[in-house]
Amino acid sequence: MRIKSIRGVKDILPDEIAKWQWTEDWARKIFRRYGFKEIRIPIFEDSRLFSRGLGETTDVVEKEMYTFADRSGDSLTLRPEGTASVVRSYVEHKMHHPPSVVKLYYMGPMFRYERPQAGRFRQFYQIGVEAMGSASPTVDAEVMCMLVDFFKTLGLPDVELQINSLGDKESRPQYRKILQNAIEPHLNNLCANCNQRYEKNPLRVLDCKEAQCKEIARDLPKTVEHLNPESREHFEEVQTLLKAAGISFAINPLMVRGLDYYSRTTFEITSSELGAQNALCGGGRYDYLVETFDGPPTPCFGFALGMERLVSVIKPGLDLETADRPDLYIVSLGDKARQASFNIAGELRSKGLIVERDYDGSSLKSQMRKANQKNCRFALIIGDNELESGKLVLKNMVESEQTEIPLDSFSDEILKIAVPAS
Ligand code: HAM
C-alpha cells in the first residue's frame, strides 16, 4: 500500500534545506542583536486558547482549526499560529516578573485547514516574534526595523510595508457602530460572508477579497479616520520613527488582519514576486490579549512570517549553494581498504571535515562518479596497494591534481590541504 502525504502538507526535501537553515540562522543572529530570545511552544494546546485568543468569529477559529478530542476527551487543537501560545506561556510562567519588556521569537509548523494553493498550505512554517510589556510606539517601529533588517540581509527583492491603525478599546466600539451604519445600506450588494460579518465582525468587511465588496469598502469609514487622540499620536510616532530609520511604507486603511486580537498598529509586508498569496508576513499590536488570559495589563507587539513564501523569493548566494558540500569522498578499493576507510573516515570527521564514502565496494569509476555527483572537493583514494605502500592518494576534484599522502600522518596532511568548508 502506498501512502501519500496529506493535501496541503509537504516535505521539505534535503535539496531545499540549506535555504531554510540559512534563513533560520540569519533570523537567530539578527533577532539576538535586538535582544530577542527563542521560546519553544507546544504544537498542540487546549482548544479554548485559540477560540478565545484569536476570536470566535475569525475564519481561523470558525473554519480552519485542526481540533480533536484526545483519549481522555479533552479538546485539543494543533496550533494555527504562535501568539496565543506565547501569551499563555508568558502568563503561566509569570514572565511579567520582574517588570521588563520580554522579547521572544519562535520557529515551527502551524496548522490551518485552508484551501491549498500556491503559497498556501495546511501545514506551514512560521518565524514569529513577540515583544511583550511596552506600549511605546518605539517598540512597533523597532520590531518593524528588525524585520526590514532581516529581509535586507537575505537580499530580498522588492517588498512593500503597509501599515494601519485599528484604534484601541476606547475608540473601537464607537467606530464599530459608525461602520455598521455605513455598511447597512449596502447589505444587498455585499457577499454572503460580509452579510454575516456585518453583525459579528464588521471590520472584516473592509478587507474582503470579493470584487463587489472591495468596491463598497473603498468608501466606508476607515479606522484611521476615527482614532482617539492617544491612538492617533501613537500612530504618528510610529510613522515618524519609520521615516527616521529610512524605511518606506504605505498606509493601507483597509488592512484589518484576520485575527481579532489586534489594536492600534497593524502591518503586513508583501512581495510582488509572490502570486495571489503575496503576504510574506503580518503582525501588529495586541494590547489586551494577556489580560484575556488573566495576566496583568501587558501591551504587546509582534509579527509572524511565512517560511515557505519567504524561502520561495530568496535568491541563494554562492555560500548557500556550497553550504552542504562534502569536503572529501573516500574511494576504497578492496576489502582491507574498505575496513581501513572506516577509521580513516571517523578520524577525518572528528577533525571537522564533511566526509562521504563508498559502502558497497563499487568500481573505481563508479565511486569517482559519485564523488563528482556529490560535488566533493576532494577524493581520497585507498586501495589495498596504497595501504601496503603506506601512501594514500588525495585528488583535488576541482583542479584534477593528485597528491600523495603518508598513511601514518594522513589527517594532519589532509587538513593542511583540505581546510573544512564549514
Ligand atoms: P498571520 O497573518 O495569520 O498572522 O500569518 C502570518 C504569516 O504566515 C502570513 O503573512 C503568511 O506569510 C503565513 N501564512 C499564514 N497562513 C498560511 C498558510 N496557510 N500557508 C502558508 N503560509 C501562511 C499570525 O499568524 C499572527 N500570529 C502574527 C502575529 C504575531 N501578530 C502578532 N504577533
Image: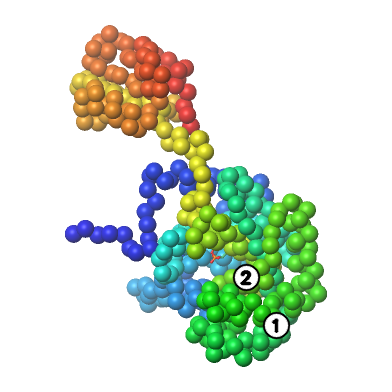
> Which residue is depicted at the point 40% across and 25% down?
377
Residue 242: image x %, image y %?
74, 56
* Residue at the extreme top of the image, as rendered: 389
Label 2 SS: loop
Residue 319: image x %, image y %?
51, 35
Query: Is residue 63 at least partly visible in the picture?
Result: yes
> Which residue is depicted at the point 28% across and 18% down?
382
Q: Given the image, on which type of amino acid does mark 2 rest?
A: Met
Callout 2 crowding tier (Cα within 10 Å): few <14, some 14–19, many ≥20? many
* First along the sequence among labels 1 and 2: 1
Residue 108: image x %, image y %?
48, 56
Query: Is residue 200 at least partly visible in the picture?
Result: no
Callout 1 crowding tier (Cα within 10 Å): few <14, some 14–19, many ≥20? many
Residue 259: image x %, image y %?
57, 72
Q: Is residue 7 left or right of residue 44?
A: left
Count of numbered tags: 2
> Which residue is depicted at the point 46% across and 37% down?
321
> With respect to residue 183, does 398 lie above or below?
above
> Which residue is depicted at the point 49% across and 60% down?
275
Label 1 SS: helix
Q: According to the image, label 2 marks what residue? A: 255
Question: Which numbered marker is on residue 175?
Answer: 1
> With respect to residue 26, does 101 lie above or below?
below
Q: Quadrant of residue 413?
A: top left
Q: Quadrant of the N terminus?
A: bottom left
Q: Quadrant of residue 264?
A: bottom right
Separation (CA) of disc 1 from disc 2: 15 Å
Q: Given the image, on which type of amino acid does mark 1 rest?
A: Tyr
> With respect to residue 236, does 148 lie above or below?
above
Between 293 and 405, the one nearer to me in the picture: 405
Q: Is residue 244 left or right of residue 361?
A: right
Question: Which numbered marker is on residue 370?
Answer: none
